Amino acid sequence: MTQWVYNFGGGSAEGNTSMKNLLGGKGANLAEMASLGLPVPPGFTLTTDVCTYYYDNGEQYPDDMNDQIEKGLSHIEELTGKKFGDPANPLLVSVRSGARASMPGMMDTVLNLGLNDETVEGLAKLSGDRRFALDSYRRFITMYSDVVMGVHHHTYEDILERHKDDQGYMLDTEMTADDWDVVIKDFKSATKRALGRDFPQDPMEQLQGAVDAVFGSWMNERAIVYRRLNDIPAAWGTAVNVQAMVFGNMGDTSATGVAFTRDPSTGDNRYYGEFLINAQGEDVVAGIRTPQTLTKVAREEMGDDAPSMEEALPEVYTQLAETFVTLEAHYRDMQDIEFTVEEGKLWMLQTRTGKRTARAALKIAVDMAEAGQISQEEALLRVDPMSLDQLLHPTLNPDAPRDLVAMGLPASPGAAIGEVVFTSDEAETLSKAGHKVILVRVETSPEDIHGMHAAEAIVTARGGMTSHAAVVARGMGTPCVSGAGDIRIDYDAQQFSVAGRTIKKGEIVTVDGATGQVFFGAVEMQQPELSGDFAKVMKWADAARRLGIRTNAETPLDVQTAKDFGAEGIGLCRTEHMFFEADRLGYFREMILAEDKEGREAALSKILPVQREDFAAIFRIMGDLPCTIRLLDPPLHEFLPHTEADIETVAQSIGVPAKELMARATDLAESNPMLGHRGCRLGISYPEIYEMQARAIFEAQKAVAEETGVTPVAEIMVPLVSSAKELEILKGKIDAIAKDVGALDYIVGTMIELPRAALRAGDIAEHAEFFSFGTNDLTQTTFGLSRDDAGRFLPDYVSQGIMEKDPFMTLDQDGVGDLIQIATERGRKTKESLKLGICGEHGGDPASVEFCHRVGLNYVSCSPYRVPIARLAAAQAAIKETK
């Protein structure tokens, strides 16, 4: 017979923490605390298997479940000396949900279950306090009607407020027993009006209703959304915890509270929490009464007059503090605790690992490791790599006032303040004049690179988390909010409007890329601190990891930022970004418009000196660290203007007829440029482009070596190869330039971004010293998806379980991952020394980094501000492998 119910209490339990998957986090920890001999009200847990059975069998329960529930109630009755439903000596219980992962979307707690018109009188006699008994009953009616029966709690709050107004009361605690009698009658009448039936009086019916509500809440909209956002499988299910009630609302020696064994905001090793005298649990979070501090020190710091728990209930506080020590030592982590004091006796209602800020997570992990409570490896596993985003960028002061204007997607973290502009040219001009600007566009394109570099932050009305704006902004470490769909941009009027509000060019806004919010005016900021605990964790991570960590960067600022963050080289330098700079875009357009090779070479010769200096600047910063430089990748039409007005302006600036420029733009336009004349195909058609770039690289390398005495390591990447012959031809041309210049230290490799390249990796490896997996395009070509357009429908695929996650955010390990593994195996079979890495956006995603570690790549490359994330994720992958 399957065991559906597990008992706890009285100094023992049928479960423990290791059974978290079966008992849920709350049930497992209640069992563990009971086994530790802590004062835990007795109870039982209905397992997560019941939830799974319930949904697998048409919302029906196992046949033997009710018998086990009755035995569970008998267990509680035996330990408390009370009986469920007994009018003279009633047992009351609480009912709580409890999944294995914390689930804020789940059913709210129901307290005081078992009360009815008869048992409330028994409770009044037993306690000697009729007011307390009726107060408990009215709370139960409110909670049960709301969370189980679906009558909104405002219905009951309004009745209570009207009664308090009539009596001239300010607080619930002023209500008398007679007052509660009247309110309870009104509450029951309200329930009957809303539902057409009486409030249930049978305790077993009440309990069954609460259990139904817990399991039903597993599939409510809030829970579904939360699971999707936090990658929690629906198959996990939730448990139900039924526990004997203890009462914090029995007078001035009773209380309820929540506490953390350390400060969850800062990580400081001191108690943090709140409590209320003569209250039940929901009062602390409801805001009806102002909670009091736990400690005297906290009260004094806050300038609060109300006594702390340490002062008001000193003996209980001492016991509570001892329990904090016991629980933190046992769980070896900061704990989030709920407790109740019933007439001077402490009861523990819950403990769980406490949620914390990234700053607190680092401090707690380091402090506990240095105190010998946990190992350095455990400390590294305690920190969520993605949470480091909070530390790497300026952030908004959480206490600062703010005026929300618009919401979009949190595409690139960090916060910035600046004046609104609507064109990239204006962003660049104003930035050079010393202004801080926020670039607001419907969407961005490669032609906006100069403005995006100049802007403090970027806001787009269209696009997803992997749109051009999002990808480029993350690479630059620039805050970005994309897909702010409610924004209506009027370029002619130089303004945008949202919800009837208009923001004009030049007005100040604040962008929070971590939350996707845009605020009017300047919101106070906080600058990141990357020393202390952060530096220690990074040092420990570097000692633990095997994967190398490089960066995707091409500007000196980005390269220096990445190096400061610990990058061990450049995994992707996108040279096309250099061509978009103002001092060489005109020359490049001349090259595109040239009628023959001589004309193209003449235009390219003008670009060579500035391209050479671009590479020299990078080499100077990186020293002897490897720099992978990708030769020109995007199709040529992206470098030409698109609108008639832009074409006219550009035509005048480069001295060609507008018609000629228009004709060339039309001639180069492609139906599907992602799959068109780009990458190595440009090098095959116009080898002079790649030859110029190779010459610039080698000449920069020699110049920096002579200047600094350190030889830069150049890794030249040929993009979009699909056959060995393409790479053989282009490598031959690069080698010829190297011989002509007298190159010092270089290798040639390719970006694997097409399925055919992955499948023919054995052949391609004959001509390559390295492969870099371009997982952005490899995902696009494997799925047949455009990352700029797929954001419109991918959420439907994720929500319906067709895809677990957006494959542009987290690597698709089954499909795209298989191609990477095939290419790895076939490439290294041909050339054992083949160096392998990835340089797509996935290089900064922890799950993708773990995959790269597992398949044996040499390094991952990511945007500068994700380098610390990748360092920690790589360390965690190595540590998990040994466990």
Image (cartoon, helix red, strand yellow):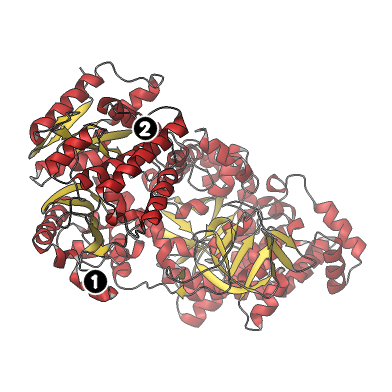
Q: Nearer the viewer, residue 291 or 240?
A: 291
Residue nearer the viewer, 762 or 342: 342
Q: Check the image and report above or below for 632 versus 712.
A: above
What residue lies at 21% left-to-right and 59% top-to-bottom? 261
Question: Dot 1 surroundings within 10 Å: few (below 14), some, or many (20 or more)?
Answer: some
Tell me the kind of residue under disc 1: Arg
Secondary structure of the residue carrying tag 2 is: helix
Q: Nearer the viewer, residue 344 or 814?
A: 344
Q: Which mark is residue 102?
A: none
> Circle 2 sits on which residue?
213
Expressed as whole percent of the image width and height from the top left, the position of residue 485 reads 65, 53
Q: CA distance from mark 2 to mark 1?
A: 39 Å
Q: Is residue 355 visible?
A: no
Q: What residue do we see at 18% from left, 71% from top?
A: 296
Looking at the image, can residue 825 be seen? Answer: yes
Quadrant (top left, top right, bottom left, bottom right) of the N terminus: top left
Residue type beneath disc 2: Ala
Q: Position of residue 708 (x, y in %)?
A: 47, 81
Is 80 placed left or right of 217 in the picture? left
Quarter where residue 692 is shown: bottom right
Rendered-image quadrant of the C terminus: top left
Residue 219: x and y in percent read 43, 33
Image coordinates for residue 140, horizontal then vertical, percent: 30, 40
Which residue is found at the position 64% from the left and 65% from the top? 577
In the image, is 699 to the left or to the right of 166?
right
CA neighbours of label 2 inside 10 A, class few (<14), some (14 to 19), many (20+): many
Write the residue at 61% across / 49% down. Answer: 728
* Residue 387 as seen in the image, left or right of residue 558: left
Choose top left, top right, bottom left or bottom right for residue 253.
Answer: bottom left
Disc nearer the start of the sequence (2/1): 2
The residue to which callout 1 is attached is 299
